[in-house]
Amino acid sequence: MNAGLKPGQEHFRFFPLHKKDTNKTIHTVDTILKIAVIGLGRIGQIHLAALKTFKNIKITAVSDISPELAKWTAAEYQIPHFYTNYQDIFQQKDIDAVWICSPTSYHLAQVKEALDSNKYIFCEKPLDKDSNNIQSLIDIYPDLNHRLMVGFNRRFDPDFAAVKASLKKIGKPTIIKITSRDPFPPTAEYTRASGGIYNDMSIHDLDMARFISESEAEQVIAVGSKNYTDDTDTTLITIKFKNGIICNIDNSRKASYGYDQRLEILGDKGMISVENKKINHLTFYSENSLESSVLEPFFLERYKDSYIEEIKAFITSIQEKKEFPSTGEDALKASILADACEKSLEQKKIIFL
């Protein structure tokens, strides 16, 4: 671990601190935004470090229930205000937007308070564990898609975005195959707080399936097993979309060989795929063997670029006064699919939507 970093914050090596920034690592946007970050755990620190690579983004406040972590983060990044009560952030009139990176159970209440304080909002997925609560939020705030962006970062991964842009080359898509396997299972505490595999892990792939298919699901079936934890940690999901596309999603909480992330789309005129990213591109050949690099260890490394690109998309949407590219509606649809997976697993049958 890098000297001077707190335990669990090794990800700082991927987003250079402001003191070490170079012209190659700084991103520039036209609009100056003052932003506050709520929740300074793993994902909050990742977003904060990514935000700090933008010249015109000013982090004016951070909040975390841990006084030590809030104070340390503010000092490390030279942020003027830090709080243990996130509501204090909404008393600051100079804040344009908030980044909500707290545990899932806090998301909806914090989003509502930010909306009532007239802030733009970026909120990590999932928006809530209950799709009915998300629907209520949409009903209460009709302009939500212009105010709230939800963190489905894989949409902004350069490889996945290139696939979406290239779909016409393979004609009419018929099959989507998504593999997403973590290198090690989470703690039991994390699993309970996150809402389980479908709301926490699969939800990225459920959103990606909608994003690629450009359609809505009409049938869902999921099977799963418990191999490493006391919760479902291995699952296969099959979705039939209204436009005829069939999607298969393969999730596991443990892949001993690294972070396995693959995407394949079959069309009537060809196929397009994204393979795993490796630590390097070297391949060694000998008389008896062929050796290549291991896979990237986890999402911090694999999806580093996506965190930068989604910030750019957030700012562009504000500048152009248009809907955010991943909205509350998208969060709702992904949540409905996650619910359908849970029901299918429990009831051992196809769920019709």
Image (cartoon, rainbow, N blue to C red):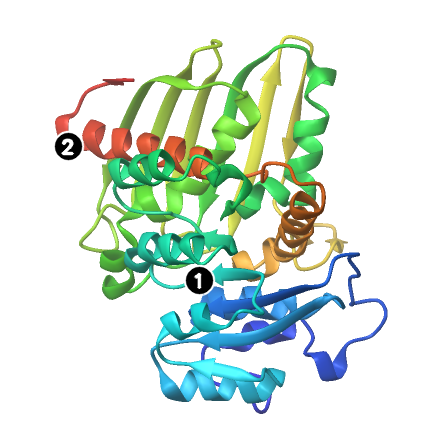
Picture coordinates of residue 68, whole percent (x, y): 40, 89
* Residue 297 appearing in the image: no
Q: Quadrant of residue 116?
A: bottom left
> In the image, what residue type sits under mark 2?
Glu
255, 173: nearer the viewer: 173
Residue beneath disc 1? 101
Q: CA distance from mark 1 to mark 2?
A: 30 Å
Picture coordinates of residue 314, whole percent (x, y): 63, 49
Quadrant the C terminus occupies:
top left
Residue at left 56%, top 44%?
154
Residue at left 86%, top 70%?
23
Q: Closer to the camera: disc 1 or disc 2? A: 1
Residue at left 78%, top 67%?
26
Q: Is residue 128 positioned above or below 350 on the image?
A: below
Left or right: residue 235 versus residue 41 is left
Task: Report crowding for label 2: few under 14, some 14 to 19, many 20 or more residues within 10 A (C-alpha).
Answer: few
> In the image, what residue type sits under mark 1?
Cys
158, 286: nearer the viewer: 158
Picture coordinates of residue 95, whole percent (x, y): 56, 67
Left or right: residue 31 versus residue 8 is right
Quadrant the N terminus occupies:
bottom right
Task: Report crowding for label 1: few under 14, some 14 to 19, many 20 or more residues within 10 A (C-alpha).
Answer: many
Residue beneath disc 2? 346
Residue 166 image label: none
Picture coordinates of residue 70, whole percent (x, y): 44, 82
